[in-house]
Image (cartoon, rainbow, N blue to C red):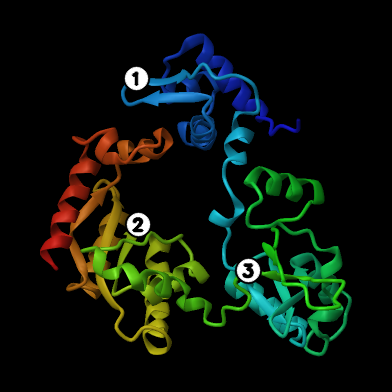
Amino acid sequence: MRTIELTKRQQTILDIVKRHGPITGERIAEMLSLTRATLRPDLSILTMAGYLDARPRVGYFFSGKKNADLFGDTLRKLKVKDYKSVPTVIDETESVYNAIVTMFMEDVGTLIVVRDRQPVGVISRKDLLKVAVGGSNINDIPVNLAMTRWAHVVTAHPEDSLYDAALRMIQNEVDSLPVVRPLPRAEGQTDTGAEVELVAVLSRESRLRKSIEPVREDYDMILVDCPPSLGLLTVNALTAADEVLIPIQCEYYALEGLVLLLRTIEKIKIYLNPGLRIGGILLTMHDPRTNISKQVMEEVRRQYPRETYRTVIPRNVRLSEAPSYGKPISEYDPLSKGAIAYRELAKEVMSNG
């Protein structure tokens, strides 16, 4: 049976916890001469995979489960259909230049090439790079001359396990797998082909809105958490939302990111969701000891006085620790400054209607 192996550092952490547990993350980091932040991803993986368990104010201890296939067993229970994302597609007649622009605008590593909404191949950054460095005019070359033909594309099916899909990606050294389903066989047809899921959805930006619409009236409020990027998932959320809550770290580059996000919101209002409004701007990771935190807070409040919440989320160690224990801050340490601040924010949001 093929197993997903732990890294050397993760195995060392396991050995330390077996010998010294329960033990805090800080103590583990000290024994390895590393920072707590460096170890956080490893501890999260070991906890979620079932190797370790954790208790607030106590630390990590060995769960008693054994063999290196625990993580694989977990992945075998999860289905591709529940974790797939919307594919980014491009017509085979489009130029390589347009493919490059689409790839970077959508922030993806692979495009599905289609003809009449059916897949005929994929094109990756590596394929585009080969054409670009070859000296040809990328505005004149269609993507179907640079793509990998569909017959050679490695795919997954909706009912496949995440474990099998992950192995397929590792074995074939690809960064993504098109999720496909068989087309009905036509009479006399020998090759049924396959259809990439969601390729037939023309208005991809409205996918989430259409999914939420039937249940909107069942809830007082629906919260949609977005990734920290302006990709397709975020655009879907903004298209579906009535209002947007914008968290901004009290740091310089976050202030620049706020300007870009507000421009995106204006475009969404023009083309996709005229009713979208800013519910509020939330200042986070505020450290009153630093000048940059004070300056960013003052600048945001000066430029957006009506939109900025009164509540400010402080930089707090407990807020940083909670995710690595797999717990919300309200459970991990409800009396911490971070937990209290978020309760105040909830009150402010509800009072604003």
**Mark 2 or mark 1, which is nearer the start of the sequence?**
1
Residue type, numbered disc 3: Glu
Q: Quadrant of the N terminus?
A: top right
Quadrant of residue 156 within the rendered picture: bottom right
Left or right of 325: which side holds 105? Answer: right
Question: Would residue 76 be found to the left or right of residue 138 on screen?
Answer: left
Query: Which residue sits at x=62%, y=27%?
Result: 9
- Identify residue for label 2: 249
| Residue depicted at x 81% and y 51% | 172
Q: Compared with residue 130, is residue 142 higher up or lower down, i.e. above or below?
A: below
Pointers 3 and 2 in contact (C-beta within 8 Å): no
**Distance in Å between CA atoms under marks 3 and 2:** 37 Å
Q: Is residue 40 visible?
A: yes
| Element marked by disc 2 | strand
Residue tagged 1: 58
Picture coordinates of residue 26, whole percent (x, y): 42, 24
Which of 149 and 345 lies nearest the eye of the viewer? 149
| Mark 3 residue element | loop
SS type, badge 1: loop
- Counting from the top left corner in percent of width and height, residue 43 is at 50, 31
- Asked if the residue under mark 3 is in contact with the one under mark 1, i.e. CB atoms within 8 Å, the reply is no
Q: Quadrant of residue 353?
A: bottom left
